Amino acid sequence: MAPHSPSSDTTDAARKQALRRAALAARDALGMDARTTASAAIARSLLTLPELMKARLVGAFWPIRSEVDPRPAAEGLLARGQAVALPHVTQDGLVFREWRAGDTLIAGSFGLSEPDPSLPPVEPDALIVPLAAFDRTGQRIGYGRGYYDGAIERLSRSRPLFTVGIGFAVQAVDHVPAEPHDRPLDCVITEAGLIRFDRTA
């Protein structure tokens, strides 16, 4: 029998949807003060990551809803002379374009704030990745459209790409059912600290 039959794929998708709903509900239930304090701690941890310190160009994102706010980290990267890019949702997937402090952002799909689409695409060396849920093996649940999995796969083809997911500790789950298209993260940072995943095992 094939490792993934249509019925098992459907079951995995349904499990992920249930985990996504529960993790996002837990995230939404956090108070504003708690989210602000946790986001600040996460930003500080991001700026101490050796892999991000070495990156020439880091892909970040503009937060929506109750997400961790990575903007202080993006501003910190710029302040020490590194370049930052933000994602733009296109028909061909995520395209990253360089962002500088003060740049005007454009309203995009799904309530996103995106860089000017006339800017040229760039290829980050590292990505700060949003998530709905994650487990202790580095598997991540996003928002169900696969944009980041596609971007990670594409950007990893020609060179190593470092990926760090950021979320609140309440978004951790016991097990994320991995599907063939899923791309695990190198590490996750929450307000509780850094979790690294062994990719050599």
Image: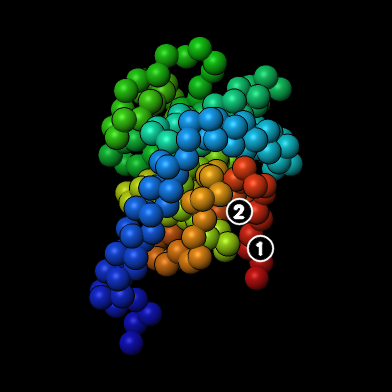
Relative to the observer, which residue lies in front, 107 or 70? Answer: 70
Along the viewing direction, whichever of 121 and 60 lies nearer the viewer: 60
Q: Residue placed at 39% from the left, 26% from the top?
A: 114
Q: Residue at x 56, y 49 (%)?
A: 169
Q: Earlier in the sequence, mark 1 or mark 2?
A: 2
Q: Give the image location of residue 115, x and y in percent.
A: 41, 23
Image coords of residue 16 (percent x, y): 36, 61
Residue 42 is tagged as none
Q: Quadrant of the N terminus?
A: bottom left
Q: Residue type at mark 1: give it.
A: Asp
Visible residue check, residue 148: no
Q: Specify the quadrant of the image occupied by residue 62.
A: top left
Residue with the mark numbered 2: 186
Vertical comparison of 199 with 86: above or below? below
The 10 Å Cα crowd at callout 2, few under 14, some 14 to 19, many 20 or more, is some
Residue that carries the numbered disc 1 in the rendered image: 198
What amino acid type should be assigned to the residue bearing mark 2?
A: Asp
